[in-house]
Image: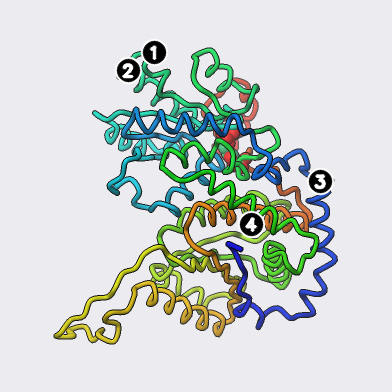
Amino acid sequence: MAVKINDKFVTPFVGAHELKNIRPALHAAYNTLLSRNGAGNDFLGWLDLPVNYDKEEFARIKVAAEKIKKSCDILVVLGIGGSYLGARAAIEFVKSPLYNELKKDTPNVYFAGNNISPNALCELLSICKGRDVCINVISKSGTTTEPAVAFRVFREWLINKYGVDGARERIFVTTDKCRGTLKKFSDESGYETFVVPDDVGGRFSVLTAVGLLPIAVAGIDIDAMMQGAADAREALTVENIDENEALKYAALRTILYRKGCATEIMVGYEPYTLMICEWWKQLFGESEGKDHKGLLPDSVNFSTDLHSLGQYIQDGVRNLFETVLDVKDCGCRFEIPNDPANVDGLNFLSGKDLDYVNKTAMLGTLIAHTDGGVPNIVLEIADRSAHSLGYLFYFFEIACAVDGYMLGVNPFDQPGVEAYKKNMFALLGKPGYEAERAVLEERIRN
Ligand code: PA5
């Protein structure tokens, strides 16, 4: 099992009777998910993806990844939310947060179109200057402003550098199979396209072409990742809920929420988990934060943030709990050198592995934070392999869907995301938004 729960640091806060009492609700939510009769049941394609994916497209993703590897120094991935977080998380987790700086035989991968920052765009364009570039624009709807603006810019850049025909060979599009302006435009322009399946929402799409193409370009074994997810599917869709680690996690976080915890902080002890936390924040925040309900997903990276947010977690308002990513094999051995002069007094650490020190910091922190009244769920992850990551993605997706149903919301929609877009379009003068614009301008004036 690539992901296991260590409940030693949460049991002081959650009684056995509470776990027993939540079973009927947990069972009901789980059955709703597996019998596919709950809210948002037209977005459950992700449940079967690890075994029931489009094999022909999967093969095409590998071919495209090889073509991209051969023809460029830089792949720019244009997408926002679920259209980029999974790929970025995977590259940082399996390879490195410094992937682009490392010596390697695969292209650098940069992410754009996930903000509206002119600085970010200018800086990336200057990095691309004089380099060979391919782009993968990813948008399920095909209409999201952030990646659409970036696509305009990079398409023009590619056409100026390689001509219309040359650019065509360097533009890869991942979008809906038939709907949307992006699909229509891509077909007319002759760009190679990949599909975001109808029944898979953005934040659940990492195991489709959305995640797989950039991940494969970075040289990560996507077969192993899918196998990890398939193994998770086998382990986490079992009848016996006592043996189901995703359900244990779902039960614990719901019990803590119902007892007054408002925030769940995902904790990593390695910079390579930073983007996993960002992906997890979108998954849970966008799935649960509805109808004025839901845990606020937050994240920290220790020991770095023990020197910033550590004080608050230890001693601030007691309405939070932590979920710790404990990667058992961190993938690196680093011996602490001896200093004959022992200037810093640290010779008691000489010859020790740095990961041993990191894990000891984790243990000390777990004890301190639980002593301080913060429940800690520990997720033990075997290693940072593509297989374990595929498993982890699926583990979180199951837990998220079940907890969404326990909360009584539709875990698969995101109506709240539209509010800012409507105001932004109205204020920017998008045709069709004239009435909203007048109302907003009046509000601003007063
Ligand atoms: O989870 C979701 O559906 C969203 O976060 C989307 O991923 C995000 O808004 C991007 O949408 P699109 O892929 O349509 O551009």
For the residue carrying disc 3, how many other residues have a C-alpha within 10 Å: few (<14), some (14-19), or many (20+)? some
Q: Is residue 78 left or right of residue 55?
A: left
Tell me where residue 50 appears, x and y as whole percent: 64, 45
Tell me where residue 319 appears, x and y as whole percent: 62, 72
Q: Considering only vertical position in the picture, is 263 above or below 365?
A: above
Q: Which mark is residue 36?
A: 3
Check disc 3 and give the amino acid type: Arg
Q: Earlier in the sequence, mark 2 or mark 4?
A: 2
Mark 2 = which residue? 162
Check disc 1 and give the amino acid type: Asp
Tell me where residue 158 appears, x and y as whole percent: 35, 22
Q: How is the image coloured?
A: rainbow
Secondary structure category for the residue under label 1: helix
Do the residues under discs 1 and 2 have CB atoms within 8 angstroms?
yes
For the residue carrying disc 4, how many other residues have a C-alpha within 10 Å: few (<14), some (14-19), or many (20+)? many
Check disc 2 and give the amino acid type: Tyr
* Residue displayed at 59% across by 49% down: 227
For the residue carrying disc 2, how many other residues have a C-alpha within 10 Å: few (<14), some (14-19), or many (20+)? some
Q: Residue furthest left?
A: 341
Q: Considering only vertical position in the picture, is 289 above or below 121?
A: below
CA separation, marks 2 and 4?
A: 43 Å
Do the residues under discs 4 and 1 have CB atoms within 8 angstroms?
no
Ligand 1: does it lie within 8 Å of the C-beta at label 3? no
Check disc 4 and give the amino acid type: Phe
Secondary structure category for the residue under label 3: loop
* Residue displayed at 57% across by 27% down: 142
Mark 4 = which residue? 395
Q: What is the quadrant of residue 220 in the picture? A: top left
- The C terminus sits in image quarter: top right
Mark 1 = which residue? 165
